[in-house]
Amino acid sequence: SSKPKGKCSHGGPFDVTTETDAIGFGINKDNENSDHGSYHIIAAKIALVATMQELESLWSTVGNDNFGRFLGFHSSSLVIVIDTTGSMGPVIELVKELTIAIIEFTRGENAFFRPSNYIFSPFNDPEWGPLTITTDAQYLIDEIKNLTVFGGGDTPELYYHGVNEALQVCEPNSIVYTFTDAPAKDYYLQPKV
């Protein structure tokens, strides 16, 4: 390996450039036994302070949630999948109440589970969707309150389409609640889901 003329070597047992210009044992401070090892602790402290300053700057720039995701601390999504076919008419108000209670449980500073986002996936027959993806719990509650049932006509519904759509966009290890009163018409999607 070559180095520019006059540049110091890193040093250490694996550095083959210590015998070329500039000749020397190297500038490394990798451990206390290095040629400049007496500076190891000082160099490590300076590196730590500089790293902390950079991370704090990034944190203040991107905010808590994005910084947490950068560090790999991302929470899961709360996914709600609801059958909106006409046969759900007798129970849709109960489903709305349960769903809103679940969402309310995730709100506030003392919430045990605070999802990174909320995903609502309605399904019907012959259609499903559209998805609602939001970080605003109240927005989702309002969507649920305005939910109406319609259509259907035959018993099996497009259950797996509704679930699959939500799973395509949710965070890993998400919590999924599904509400339906019918078997799946699209059972062929079960392995994918």
Image (spheres, rainbow, N blue to C red):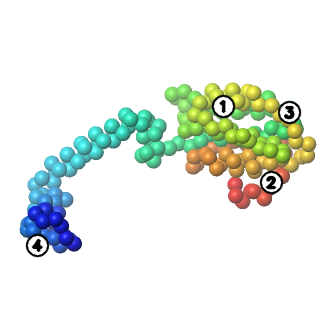
Tell me whether the residue at label 2 lies in contact with that at label 3, contact meaning CB atoms closer than 8 angstroms. no
Residue drawn at the location 75% of the way across and 49% of the way down: 161
x and y, in percent, of residue 75 in the image: 53, 42
Amino acid carrying mark 2 in the image? Asp
x and y, in percent, of residue 116 in the image: 55, 38
Tell me whether the residue at label 1 lies in contact with that at label 3, contact meaning CB atoms closer than 8 angstroms. no
Of pointers 3 and 4, the one earlier in the residue sequence? 4
- What's the distance in space between the residues labelled 3 and 4, CA to CA? 84 Å
Name the front one of labels 4 and 1: 4
The residue under label 4 is: 19
Disc 4 on helix, strand or loop? loop
Mark count: 4
Name the front one of labels 2 and 4: 4
Regarding residue 101, the answer to whether it shows in the image is no
- What's the distance in space between the residues labelled 4 and 1, CA to CA? 68 Å
Amino acid carrying mark 4 in the image? Glu
> Which class describes the residues within 10 Å of circle 3: few (<14), some (14-19), or many (20+)?
few
The residue under label 3 is: 89
Q: Which mark is residue 186?
A: 2
> Which class describes the residues within 10 Å of circle 2: few (<14), some (14-19), or many (20+)?
few
The residue under label 1 is: 140
Residue drawn at the location 70% of the way across and 30% of the way down: 143
In the visual, does 153 lie left or right of 41? right
- What's the distance in space between the residues labelled 2 and 1, CA to CA? 26 Å
Disc 3 on helix, strand or loop? helix
Residue drawn at the location 63% of the way across and 27% of the way down: 138
Please name whichever residue, 90 or 58, is drawn nearer the observer in this view of the structure. 58
